[in-house]
Image (tube, rainbow, N blue to C red):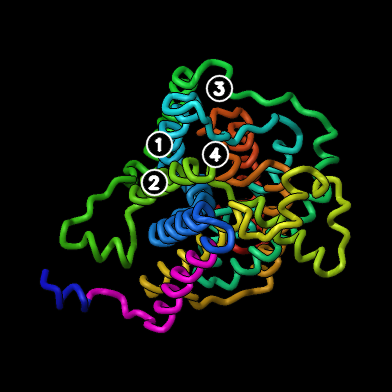
Amino acid sequence: MTASTQHKESPVLEQGTLALYILVILFGSLYIQSAVGLRQSLLFLIGIGLGISLLHAMFGFTGGWRQFIRNQDSKGVRAQILLVMLTSVFFFPLLGQVFSEQVPAGAVAPLGYSVLVGAFLFGIGMQLGGGCGSGTLFTAGQGQVDMLITLAFFIIGATMGSAHLMWWFELGDLGTFSLVKEVGWLPGLVITLAVLIIIYSVVRAIDKRKNRSLSPVYTPVSKDKLIPTLLYGKWPIWWAVISLAVLNLLTMLTAGHPWSITYAFSLWGAKIWSALGGNVQYWEYWMLGYPSKSLDSSVLLDTTSVMNFGLLIGAGLAATLASRYAPKMTLTKNKLFAVVVGGLLLGYGARLAFGCNIGALLAGISSGSLHGWLWLVSAFIGNIVGTYLRVFIKLDKAF
């Protein structure tokens, strides 16, 4: 293929928008470095990489789960399992002090009612709101109007969740359980991979029995299409699996903890409510150590916020490159109701459950924490309910 042919096949770029995104990335990273330090600037750039990967591959948990629930199409679910497996391979040795005496912090949280109920509510919100934590961010960065509304109510719901969180904690829990600490990093990794392989085999068998042929996770890309695909999308889903796992590893090495998303939403909401005259600083949760400190500090000092800003910008840049920025859509009354309620459930549920599909499921399981598995089961049940609710409010056709 000649260079001229490649140019003709490339999307028509919005030159002004593209230049603006490049300037925002350049000056944003320089400003963050000068204002708060190199570490935060690097995390901002990692967030941009996450946004590009998610948008170019359109990689999200919500659609994959809905396709499996409705049609037993397991392609998205299988890709997500592979992502958790690869991330676990990266994380378990780090958490087991294989490479250094300085151990990063894994995403380990207690098994309790807050996770059980929060993940269930989050699962319903995924299907009504049309996205998970990462999915809401990258599609909002793309300029999708419905997801911008979901994001706004996600923030409101997360703020409400922070107001009630300590009450949920008082209901009690079974404590934390980390495979890394209880059985060692290598046996813990073997157990985790074995369970994930079993789940992979089960969903694959269900798909094959229903649909006879499987949609492959791995699809090759020819050499002449490699660069155009890399720049303009659409990426094969396995590219997203690898890039997201590697970027999560870089987050762990840079920030000292796994990639997470939703803490920032409660922080943004609390800061906004405080600016409007609310007494957020007297809420019990915001009187705790790190929350209190982050409430009184610049959002640029908060790792999750900086990465979320980068993710939004990276998704916008990728959407511009792919000529998929701000797609046209009709926002019906039913859809508006769904995204408002879905956003509230996403935010409230994530705050109770110690995170979303990224901060609780992916980070939790790949850190060896059993709360990640509880989150997975409870959220999947919530997704089943949410999928049927979509039919009930006429967003989707009946099964």
Amino acid identity at mark 3? Leu
Q: Quadrant of the N terminus?
A: bottom left
Q: Nearer the viewer, mark 4 or mark 2?
A: 4
**Mark 1 in CB contact with mark 2 (< 8 angstroms):** yes
In the rendered structure, does residue 10 fall within the stretch colored magenta?
yes
Q: Which residue, given by chain and number where applicable, does mark 4 sit on?
A: 363
Amino acid identity at mark 1? Leu
Instruction: Left or right? Give the position of 52 relative to 283.
Output: left
Give the vertical position of 200 relative to 79 (above or below). Answer: above
Give the residues in magenta: 9-32
Using a 10 Å C-alpha cutoff, classify the residue at mark 4 as few (fewer than 14 neighbours), some (14 to 19) or many (20 or more): many
Q: Nearer the viewer, mark 2 or mark 3?
A: 3
Amino acid identity at mark 2? Val
Give the vertical position of 260 relative to 135 (above or below). Answer: above
Q: Which residue, given by chain and number where applicable, does mark 1 sit on?
A: 86
Using a 10 Å C-alpha cutoff, classify the residue at mark 3 as few (fewer than 14 neighbours), some (14 to 19) or many (20 or more): many
CA gap between label 3 and label 4 equals 13 Å
Sequence-first tag of 4 and 1: 1
Q: Tag 2, which secondary structure?
A: helix
Sequence-first tag of 4 and 2: 2
Residue pictured at 28% horizontal, 62% vertical: 229
**Mark 1 in CB contact with mark 3 (< 8 angstroms):** no
Residue 54 at x, y percent in the picture: 44, 57
Residue 56 at x, y percent in the picture: 39, 61
Using a 10 Å C-alpha cutoff, classify the residue at mark 2 as few (fewer than 14 neighbours), some (14 to 19) or many (20 or more): many
Residue pictured at 54% horizontal, 39% vertical: 363
153 or 329: nearer the viewer? 153
Q: Which residue, given by chain and number where applicable, does mark 2 sit on?
A: 241
Sequence-first tag of 1 and 2: 1
Residue 297, quarter of picture? bottom right
